[in-house]
Image (cartoon, rainbow, N blue to C red):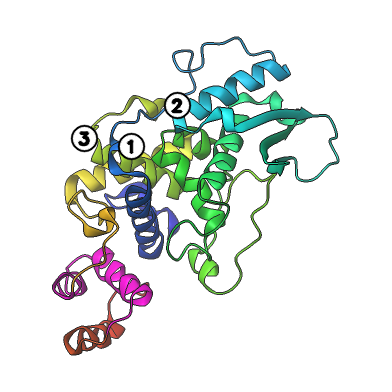
């Protein structure tokens, strides 16, 4: 069942996963600005963007760190970069505060694989950008996932998608009280199919029909990306659009909610329900439509 998306023009995500990715991307746009994403290149692992020789030395790693900060528009001067030698120490990577100075510490073992190191640093910088926890509305339940997604928005999605495990867990676990602790030495929690879809959203809004980054993605992420981009180009079925009020940090009006609740796409119906859950309102017409959706054909809705 899960592999059906390989053979048809749909997306490799459940409706819940699809709407979660799109709403979080909308929140990024509201928080960091849509032009930041539209003007960013999706960075590939090649010599054009990482031209410095890399011999796994501390200084080589620091130069990579500086480039990542530049790509993500993070003030590198706000951090001290440290490599440490204790392979038994946990966490293996962390951002901490020492007498008012932010320090990004990384175990030497992580320097062996430059691409994986880039993904790890990007996620930790994303975590710091989000204030460590509650920068965005409703993020308490999914901070562990959002730190994987933000690098996609900021141009480093190829590295994160290539470094994550190709897992197939059910998204609802993060909304049933079983959210795992955000672990500093992990390879990422978002599966490649969701990161591939997020990369497709970026390409779609940037009006990229054949993005060059595709050839650098590992097979599972590349397949999800290509299938998703074709689907978006064919259907325009996404709430991550420039005219969506959520991108500007606004809530949907009653008229917009009713329109989305009655939309032919389950993406819009579920997104409307999610908005109502986060911003409850007592409007008879909305309440009636929500009750009708209890018999929706899409089980996620």
In this figure, which residue is indicated by the disc labeled 3? 207
Reply above or below: 181 against 160. Answer: below
Q: Quick one: label 1 or label 3, which is nearer the N terminus? A: 1
Q: Quick one: label 3 or label 2, which is nearer the N terminus? A: 3
Could you tell whether 22 is left or right of 115 in the image? left
Q: Is residue 226 visible?
A: yes
Q: Secondary structure at mark 3?
A: loop
Q: Quick one: label 1 or label 2, which is nearer the N terminus? A: 1
CA separation, marks 3 and 2? 19 Å
Snapshot quadrant of residue 43: top left
Q: Secondary structure at mark 1?
A: helix
Pair 3/2: label in front? 3
Q: Is residue 56 visible?
A: no
Pair 1/3: label in front? 1
In this figure, which residue is indicated by the disc labeled 1? 36
Which residue is at the front of the view, 215 or 121?
A: 121
């Amino acid at each position: 069942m899960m592999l059906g998306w390989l053979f048809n023009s749909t997306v490799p995500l459940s409706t819940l996963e699809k709407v979660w990715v799109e709403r979080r991307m909308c929140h990024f746009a509201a928080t960091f600005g849509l032009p930041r994403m539209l003007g960013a290149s999706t960075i590939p692992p090649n010599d054009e963007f990482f031209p410095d020789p890399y011999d796994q030395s501390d200084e080589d790693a620091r130069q990579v760190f500086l480039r990542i900060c530049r790509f993500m528009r993070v003030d590198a001067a706000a951090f001290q970069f440290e490599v440490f030698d204790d392979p038994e120490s946990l966490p293996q990577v962390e951002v901490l505060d020492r007498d008012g100075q932010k320090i990004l510490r990384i175990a030497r073992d992580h320097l062996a694989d430059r691409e994986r190191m880039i993904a790890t640093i990007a996620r930790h910088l994303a975590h710091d950008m989000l204030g460590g926890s509650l920068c965005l509305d409703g993020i308490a339940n999914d901070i562990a996932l959002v730190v994987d997604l933000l690098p996609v928005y900021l141009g480093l999605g190829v590295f994160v998608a290539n470094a994550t495990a190709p897992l197939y867990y059910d998204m609802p676990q993060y909304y049933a009280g079983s959210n795992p602790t955000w672990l500093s030495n992990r390879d990422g929690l978002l599966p490649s199919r969701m990161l591939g879809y997020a990369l497709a959203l970026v390409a779609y809004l940037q009006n990229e029909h054949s993005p060059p980054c595709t050839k650098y993605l590992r097979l599972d992420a590349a397949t999800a990306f290509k299938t998703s981009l074709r689907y978006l180009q064919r259907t325009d079925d996404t709430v991550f659009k420039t005219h969506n009020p959520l991108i500007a940090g606004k809530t949907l009006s009653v008229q917009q909610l009713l329109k989305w609740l009655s939309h032919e796409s389950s993406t819009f119906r579920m997104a409307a329900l999610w908005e109502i859950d986060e911003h409850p309102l007592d409007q008879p017409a909305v309440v009636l439509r929500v009750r009708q959706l209890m018999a929706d054909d899409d089980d996620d809705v």
